[in-house]
Image (cartoon, rainbow, N blue to C red):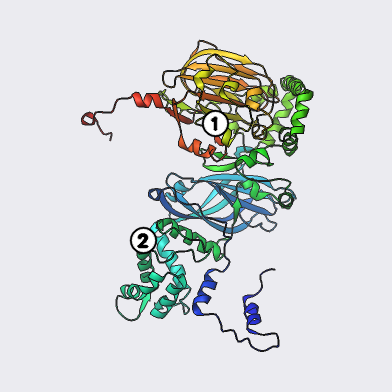
Amino acid sequence: MGHGSSKSSSLDESADSSGGTNSKPPPSFRARIKQKLHLRRRPATSQHAKLNSHENFVGIALVTLINAEMKFKDKWLACISIGEQTFRTDVSDQTSMPTWNSEKKFVLESNGPHIAKISVFETNRLSKNNLIGYCEIDLFEFLSRASDSDIEVFDLSDPSSSNVVVGKISISCSIEDPIETEKSFARRILSIVDYNGDGKLSFSEFSELINAFGNQLAAKKKEELFKAADVNGDGVVSMDELATLLAVQQEKEPLINCCPVCGEILEISDKLNSMIHMSLCFDEGTGNQIMTGGFLTDKQASYGWMFKLSEWAHVSSYDVGLNSGSSASHIVVFDRRKKRLVEEIIDGKIVLSMRAIYQSKIGLGIMDKGAKEILQSLSEKQGKKMSSVESAKDIPTFLEFFKDQINLAEVKYPIDHFKTFNEFFIRELKNGARPVACAGHDDVAVCAADSRLMAFKTAEESLRFWIKGKKFSIQGLLGNLPCSNDFIDGTLVIFRLAPQDYHRFHFPISGTIEQIVDIPGCLYTVNPIAVNSKYCNVFTENKRAISIISTADFGKVAFVAIGATMVGSITFTKKKGDHVQKGDEFGYFSFGGSTVICVFQKDSIALDEDLLATSARSLETLVSVGMQLGVSIKKRTELPLPDINNCVLGA
């Protein structure tokens, strides 16, 4: 095992056991080329993200984390997260001026992820490293600057307060034109056979390279291709000329049918994705990029050897989808605004206890024998405690635990305004902190809470992708209200609030509150560990308050506020008969995490496709109050078609 010297390996192969030379002939030129191309070959399971749309392809961005200036000495590592990818540098020496010079390439699309989060960690901890500072960079803005320099220095913000600067980091970013991507890839491939480095290739060199690609059709046309490039007929062509010719030919009829680095079969019909794949793969396969990848979030990338040991021993797991909720120690969600994966912080001891209770028959058996009453009593006592003056001292500890997930700049009042923990927990936000999408257009529904969202066209889909309770149904959720049959086969949207979230919920639609009905019940946790359990029915057994809202654009909408463990109460700030506008505050949950579920009548709303797509992966989407949720189907079908003759185009 291990990586020996290539020189010593070749000597071993050329000598027999008696010390003489082996009669085995040396590898052919073609074999040597293939061996060189497959050097540092990537694992077959590793795949590059594909373009969603060729029309949206902007180019390949090269981001380099150069160095940083910190306020104290330590060993440092940096991570870059964009979309569903996270990469990390090596650990620096003990210094206050770490240097990494680590680069990574990303495919950019006009409608794809482009907000990169840079995180800097100190590495003096065994189990996990400590996040010291971060910054967020809009790569589109970076690349469109007027400056001639590719390098810019960014402030690193304290995770506890974005107003506090803890250091600086130097980052460079440049982008390859799509055409240049093809040319540069061809130049890199061709340079392998340009042994004298003069930038020119003879026909024999070019011929051997084409043969190494294994494309029989291309091999028959190599003389024709070479002559087309050899404009002056001197028997050699420049690298740039041949690269241009190959780039054009790759668009017409691909010369390479499989990636020469990782061996993956390429889709002939998808030429652009194939070229992007090979370009990125070549860089990684030849060791030009030194950042380590394969991580979901910066927190995962920063974990030390203790976490790796627990992964190896299967004590914990780290994944997206159902695994992240039902059996793992980490909950990973997709941030809709920033289009990247983020990790939800949850105490490890709580995870273990919830798994013991909600993921086993024994645990739920304990629940049935009195633990439900214990949860009720515990929640009531905790609610009273969090409303006491003494509880205010817990606010700083809470903020430190969730230091990079609570934005104090949005909070309406300063911290010293809150006299109890619960006052802070039900904090209000400043005006404008949560803008409402399409304000004034009641045919557009919006998100009801800062939360982790799951959206399903029907309850049956929710059972397939998320809710594992055997008895879940719309009628059970609505407590058999007389109007519950109106929501059969209706659309279901689940807003799960975590403790660190803003805990006031808002109306997703405009209309009139017809009724508010309280339904008593248990106080199970609403964490995915319980929701994904097949042994209990969180949403149909928990305490909840059901509101029916009559609207002009969506028909009736059921708004279900669900209590949970440690949630002392559900408080409404509106009452039956009130006419409300979407985005208006409806109420709040006291201490704890909880959930709002909105049920729309069948064929009344077309949910946004990105929310449906993420939910179909059993992956929650992190959303904020006021974000667009969907559009009224009824309103859209009733609108008359515009008169083209009277249309006026805006300037």
Q: Residue at x 64, y 88 (%)?
A: 21
Q: Say what secondary structure mark 2 lies in.
A: helix
Q: Is residue 42 left or right of residue 312?
A: left
Looking at the image, which is closer to me, 471 or 352? 471
Looking at the image, which is closer to me, 362 or 426? 362
Q: Is residue 10 left or right of residue 233?
A: right
Looking at the image, which is closer to me, 199 or 317? 317
Q: Which residue is mark 2?
A: 251
Identify which amino acid the numbered label 1 is placed on: Glu
Which residue appears farthest toward the top when viewing the image?
Answer: 577
**Residue 593 appears in view:** yes
Q: Residue at x 39, y 24 (%)?
A: 634
Q: Which residue is mark 1?
A: 460
So how many labels did they put on this image? 2
Provide residue 52's location: percent of width, then percent of height.
44, 48
Q: Residues within 10 Å of mark 2 (few under 14, many from 20)?
A: some
Q: Residue at x 61, y 58 (%)?
A: 99
Is 201 situated above or below 575? below
Which label sits on residue 306? none
Q: Earlier in the sequence, mark 2 or mark 1?
A: 2
Image quadrant holding the C terminus, namely top left
Provide residue 483's location: percent of width, then percent of height.
52, 15
Rounded to the nearest whole Å, what is the CA distance between mark 2 and mark 1? Answer: 45 Å
